Amino acid sequence: MTGWWRIITKTPDKLQVSFATELPPGARAIAASSAVAEDLLAKIGEHDFKNEPEQVLPILTDGGWRVLVGFGDLAKLDTACLRRIGGQIFAELKDVGITRLGLQLDLAPAQLAQLIYGMRLRAWRPAAHYRQRPDDEKVWHLKQIIGLTDAPGAAAACFERLDKIADAVHFARDLVVAPANYLTPKSFLDLVGEIKGVSLEVVDPVKAGLHLLQAVGQGSAFPPALAILHYQGGGKAAPLALVGKGITFDTGGIDIKPRLHLEEMKGDMGGAAAVAGALMALAARRAPVNVVGLLAIAENMVSGCAMRPGDVVKGFAGQTVEIIDTDAEGRLVLADALAYAAARFKPSVMIDLATLTGAVEITLGFERAGLFTADDRLASSLFAAGEAEDEKLWRLPLTDRYDDALASPIADLRNCTWERGPDALHAARFLQHFVPEQVPWAHLDIAGLSEAQEDGPLAAEGPTGFGVRLLDRLVSDLYESAP
Ligand code: BES
Ligand code: ZN
Ligand code: ZN
């Protein structure tokens, strides 16, 4: 790929991390023993440092910068909390002038690795090449972290895996932030084709009978495609299938969206980005599993050859769909991708991720993604993975109660209703019609989570990479934990 629009996904400002027993010359230290903290607090007099978890207080002393980090009750510190503390430390210290930072904390090696992982997750910004001059707000000096521990080997071994997952989370963010003239269906395919350890197969929707995917993409100058990412790490076992909505831009189609914040629809491929990121992480850490990632890639445009409201389209599964609203396109592309994945790969489990509905934001806000499944065990595994990774889910109803809303006077189904109603639930039920009953399947509506409205501990405002950590954790819980 050449040209000024090339997407750079390997950011040169990656935080360098190492572990050592002693601080190399030139690195500033954080001292965290309570004795040191108390001494400093006594010196500064009035303060609001309450040693609460995630509280970070930088202090400029005559000996240089000292930073107090609140840990609260050490016994209550879980992994998610350590990461959040790390993320907050990064946010506080990234631009105070420190380049190399030593961390001397009363933590076990694995805990130290988790805390630094939180720093790495937070240390992401859009690639510099989208602007001529750097954004002052997003310039940071902090480049290198040295974790001080008696067991640097153990900490480094633990961090090695986390570092790969952080790379994959950042890759997903790079994809979501990329403008739609950079990330076209074509360049999306090129980029996911570069993921190491994963092979890419591109399926032509017309040849494969994926007419719903074709219909959504037919108005664009770039042809739609089903990208299949194959990762083979688990012998002959049936694969886990991960399916992602990859609409590189959602204008709404002929039912065009209002113009306010329409630019945000460049991120309507957050589900596909999460799936691509998950495969990148699993391949990089050589997870002992078989996974197929299916990205339903299309651009939903307004044009003379765009699909129309009222069109009836027969999808891969054979059912016909009356397109009521061309803006309810995500469920169309996913219906084909899910049906295709189930028929071809006979997966042991199938999970789709999609920025599917505005309605889920109204239902759950920006704290949790919608989880829909008929399988209670899959629901609890996903819920637990979400809690552990701070990528939280909440289960919502998936029932045939909504079939009336999806009944069409002319076709087998319609893609949505004009009645006021729970559209996120209708969309999930719509998808269920395309998944064979025997396949354990879950649908995650991540519309409110793929991009953050405000700064959080592990991601600043902007793309979050939501789903990468969740899927990686799910795989390790389901397939890698000791019996
Ligand atoms: N991509 C949108 C959903 C979305 C909205 C994602 C806001 C992220 C933020 C989806 O394709 C869509 O437009 N859904 C419609 C469905 C409606 C026409 C039934 C919606 O939510 O309005
Ligand atoms: Zn739409
Ligand atoms: Zn959409």
Image: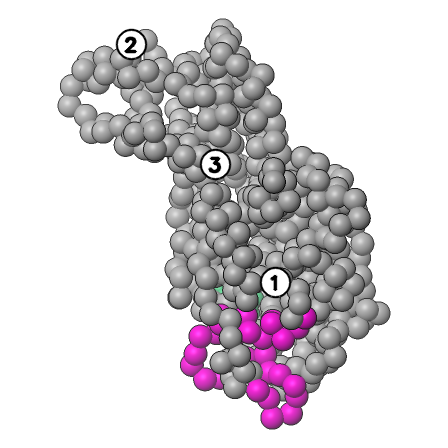
Q: Nearer the viewer, residue 152 or 49?
A: 152
Circle 1 sits in a helix, a strand or a loop, which is it? Answer: strand
Q: Quadrant of the N terminus?
A: top right
Q: Nearer the viewer, mark 2 or mark 3?
A: 3
Relative placement, left or right, of 409 versus 105 is right
Relative placement, left or right, of 12 versus 291 is left
Q: Visible in this render: residue 416?
A: yes
Q: Amino acid at mark 1?
A: Trp
Q: Amino acid at mark 2?
A: Asp
Dot placed on the residue nearer the N-terminal end, 2 or 3: 2
Which residue ends up furthest to the left in the rendered image?
Answer: 46
Circle 2 sits in a helix, a strand or a loop, which is it? Answer: loop
Q: Quadrant of the C terminus?
A: top right
Mark 3, ligand 1, within 8 Å: the answer is no
Mark identifier at residue 62: 2
Instruction: Inspect the magenta stretch and tell me whether residue 412 lies in it.
Output: yes
Which range is magenta? 407-436
Residue 82 image position (x, y, % from top left): 42, 32
Residue at image location 26% in from the left, 28% down from the top = 51
